[in-house]
Amino acid sequence: MAHDLSSEAGLTDATDAVPQLETVLDDEHAGVRNSVRRRVRDVEGEETEARFEVSVEGEQRLEGLRKEMNRILKKETVRLERVVRDVERALSELPFVIQETDDGRRFSRRRKIAEWETTGRVPLHAHRTATHSLLGPLSLDESLDPGHFRRALFLDTETTGLSGGTGTVAFLLGLAYVENDELFVEQIFLPSYGEEVPMLRYLRERIESADVIVSFNGKSFDWPLLRTRFVMNRVAPPRQIPHCDLLHVARRIHKERLSDMRLQTIERDVLGLERIGDIEGALIATVFGHFLRTGDGEGVRRVVEHNEQDVLSMVALLAVYGSIDPTALDDTSVLESTDFLGIANTLRRARKLEEAEAVVSQVIAKNPCANAHRTRAVIAKAQKNSKLAAADYHASLEMEPSASVHLELSKLYEHKLKNPQQALLWALEGTSEGAELARKREGRLRKKLETK
């Protein structure tokens, strides 16, 4: 805005107008400042009001969320309390005795095996009278001594998964052992994940008092899993003792007889036991999870029965394998001729050649077959008895043609019996080797005959 200072102030001298000019400018600046201040206050008021409205709305929403969370937590707490009561009630109905220890509760079940009890056709107490003389060689483990099995600890677990690893827990431990000349089976149950220590400490005590662990696939699964649980719970593991895994023994003995090496297959086809109403192994982890969520113990009862039978079947198998006498095969044994040939081959691998020959010779005397003669021929070769080896190979060919036997005879006659003519004749019969190798063998033998 323009101002006429002379007319406004009534002054004619410009010098007199200077103080008046300053006064007018100050007034105008003050007005602007006041106007700005008012606007700022208006804006701040609007923002403050908006923030207040937002804050009130937010608090209302948060309060609603708090109420919903409290409702859900209260409902879940009630449910969990009910599950805990159901689990405790189920535990009281399961066949376990609660034992209080310094580390907490241990749920255990132990019973004495009666003299008349069997697994299939095998008396369970036969384990006590077995010599176990061949179990070391049959396990291909020199650390296993026959005397160890008088204080054997049979071990089997039921777990929360089949993959192993740090997240897998053994919730049921099955044991068997001889005490005061009586056979006992004992099971330790884990009712919750936080109660492993009492079970692990008891297992350590049992292992410390044993001379050998006997399991079925325990070297690959049960024992590595338990060793991990000792570490995870900061419990000192037991001392290391020999371990006889019956799965490895069964594979060597029954590989020609059985289609698979599951324990239930061996029970059915070797021991003569057919389980009825048994729970499938793949469902066991699910059953335990259901028990923890609901307190329903019916499925756990079936798992306990399943686990006990697993342990007793191991006792029966050890009785069978521990009773093998290479000098006098038992006609009443549950083992068959193909099983004894598996025993002979395993003894040969263990360098128990005399025992291996004794076993296979008895098989040939009672039930001669081509496979038995081939087995004895291989043992005779290991004994450096080339004539007996050749005789058995010839005997096997009379029962069953075989190109691989032609090859073995050709090798024996060429390298051991020093008869290149016979070696060539068997080579010309056709061998199991490739065409190029057969051509080279024939050419080499013809040259030997030419220079003879």
Image: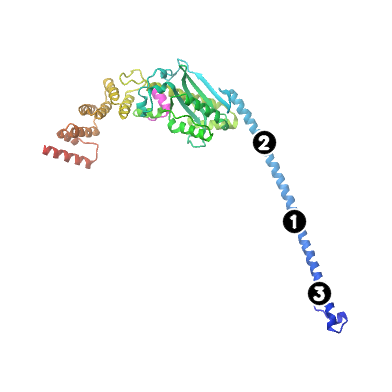
CA distance for labels 3 and 2: 74 Å
In the picture of the structure, the residue carrying the numbered disc 1 is 50
Q: Residue at x 67, y 39 (%)?
A: 72
* Residue 289 screen position, x and y as percent: 55, 32
Q: Is residue 137 left or right of residue 77?
A: left
Dot 2 falls on a residue whose secondary structure is: helix
Residue segment shown in magenta? 257-270
Could you tell me which secondary element the residue under label 1 belongs to? helix
Q: Quadrant of residue 136?
A: top left
Amino acid bearing label 1: Ala
Position of 53 relative to 161 (above/below): below
Mark 3 in CB contact with mark 1 (< 8 angstroms): no
What is the spatial separation of the Cα atoms under label 2 and label 1, in whole angstroms? Answer: 38 Å
Disc 2 target residue: 75
- Using residue 396 as the reference point, say whether residue 129 is left or right of it: right
Q: Is residue 53 above or below residue 163?
A: below
First along the sequence among labels 3 and 1: 3
Q: Which residue is labeled 3 in the image? A: 25
**Residue sitting farthest toward the right:** 10
Q: Secondary structure at mark 3?
A: helix
Q: Disc 2 residue type?
A: Lys
Query: Is residue 413 covered in magenta?
Result: no
Give the mark nearest the N terminus, 2 or 1.
1
What amino acid is at disc 3?
Leu
Mark in front: 3 vs 1:
3
> Could you say which quadrant of the image residue 298 lies in?
top right
- The N terminus - image quarter: bottom right
Residue 262 in the magenta stretch? The answer is: yes
Quarter of the image with the C terminus in it = top left
